[in-house]
Amino acid sequence: MEPGALLYDPDTGKVGEYQDSAGPYALLRPVGGGREWQADPESLRPATDRERLLAGVHAANTRARTDAPFLVNVPPRPVPDCASCEELAELRALARAEHDHSAETDANVLLRKHRSEAHPV
């Protein structure tokens, strides 16, 4: 087994990247990183294309959920009857319509900052 090879472990039902051996075990790491686990080298087999693809999708989805835990998923709402809030919400809407995710994020940050300063709870 070569380091980096993607192998299917039937005992766990997971695809892992072969790292090394430790005693009688093979050490596998989840695709995309994570905690290694020990597997019986006799039961391992090369991952199929489908298994490799599913493992990659799972890793991408996990990364998307955990890469930036400081980001808030729900965009801030403008306070009714506040011209500054409405202006920032309009900037965000324009950025979203233009698929400019950076500008949309900037508008969210500015709206959160404005709300915390002008409309403290």
Image (tube, rainbow, N blue to C red):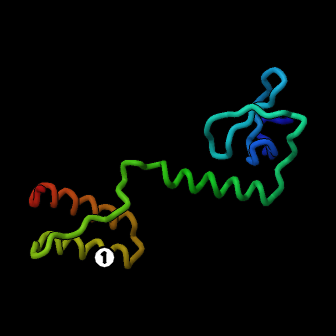
Left or right, 72 with reference to 49: left
Image coords of residue 54 (percent x, y): 71, 58
Q: Residue at x 77, y 56 (%)?
A: 51
Q: Which residue is mark 1?
A: 93
Instruction: Give the residue displayed 19% in from the left and 70% down from the top.
Output: 78
> Nearest the camera: 77 or 99?
77
Residue in the image at 79% along x and 34% along y: 39
- Looking at the image, the residue that sits furthest to the front is 11
Vertical placement of 92 versus 37: above or below? below
In the displayed structure image, the side of residue 80 where residue 32 appears, left or right: right
Q: Quadrant of residue 49?
A: bottom right
Give the structural element (helix, strand or loop) at label 1.
Answer: helix
CA neighbours of label 1 inside 10 A, class few (<14), some (14 to 19), many (20+): some
Nearer to the camera, 26 or 60? 26
* Residue 98 in the image: above or below residue 110: below
**Residue 48 vs residue 95, the one in the foreground:** 48
